Amino acid sequence: MASERLTDWSVKFLSMDESVSEDIMCATHRALCEHGYAALTMQDIADESSKSKASLHYHYDTKRDLLLAFLDNLGERMTERLAAVDGETPTDEFLALLEELLSPSTERYPEFHTALLEIKAQAPYVDGFRERIADIDALVHERLRAVVAAGVEAGEFRADLDPEETATFVLTLLNGVRTRHVAVGGSPDDVEGTLLRYVEDQVVAAEAEAPVE
């Protein structure tokens, strides 16, 4: 995971005062929304922060270093979002999880996810981007897989359902929804009904089965 990959810049990040770190991460978010990834500069981030450009460079040598820390922070926030999702039954939890993942994670959802899509496009070429994006992807995938597995075991989901394959399918669909939204303007609301019908028809068991001992 990202927390295990300690480099010089990440040691600085981990030892940084929490309020300073939060200020820089929020400033990076605002700057990405405003300028996108390609045009983003350290000065743009400093302009959104209470810190100077020189201060940013004290903590992060380059824009890449800062964005690596930002992606680590994004992973932490995703962990918090997933932990807050709950339900009385696996079915309730699965539906609540889908609703959370379809909901905008920021008030500037289109702008931020446009910038994030730019970062993802650079993942094959910029060292460190792919690993951190994969970490976030794995967090969501594992939570989906675990809920599906719990539903199968409880007899609420179809017994022949493969939790790994189901999680991969749903996550791929969700990623596609976000990409379509920023690329051509499609809304997550456009597929929410279809996704819920998929859950009803292909995931939830027709009749409750006895839990696996």
Image (spheres, rainbow, N blue to C red):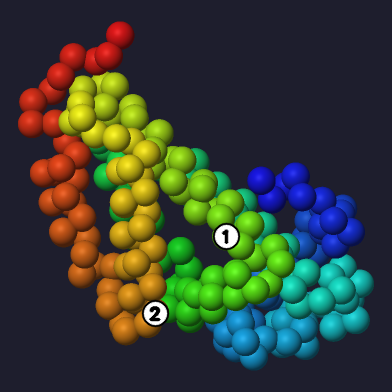
Where's residue 124, x and y in %? 60, 70
Residue drawn at point x = 84 percent, y = 70 percent:
60
Residue drawn at point x = 21 percent, y = 30 percent:
160
Where's residue 147, x and y in %? 36, 35
Q: Is residue 122 left or right of residue 212?
A: right
The kind of residue on which mark 2 rests is Val
Q: How far is the residue under mark 1 from the one under mark 2? A: 18 Å
Between discs 1 and 2, the one toward the N terminus: 1
Q: Is residue 177 left or right of residue 161?
A: right
Query: How many numbered marks, from 0 up?
Result: 2
The reply to whether residue 112 is visible in this rendering is no
In the rendered view, would you say 34 is above or below 10?
below
Q: Quadrant of the C terminus?
A: top left
Mark 1 — residue?
133
Which corner quadrant of the image does residue 11 belong to?
A: bottom right
The kind of residue on which mark 1 rests is Ile
Of circles 1 and 2, the one toward us is 1
Which corner quadrant of the image does residue 22 belong to?
A: bottom right
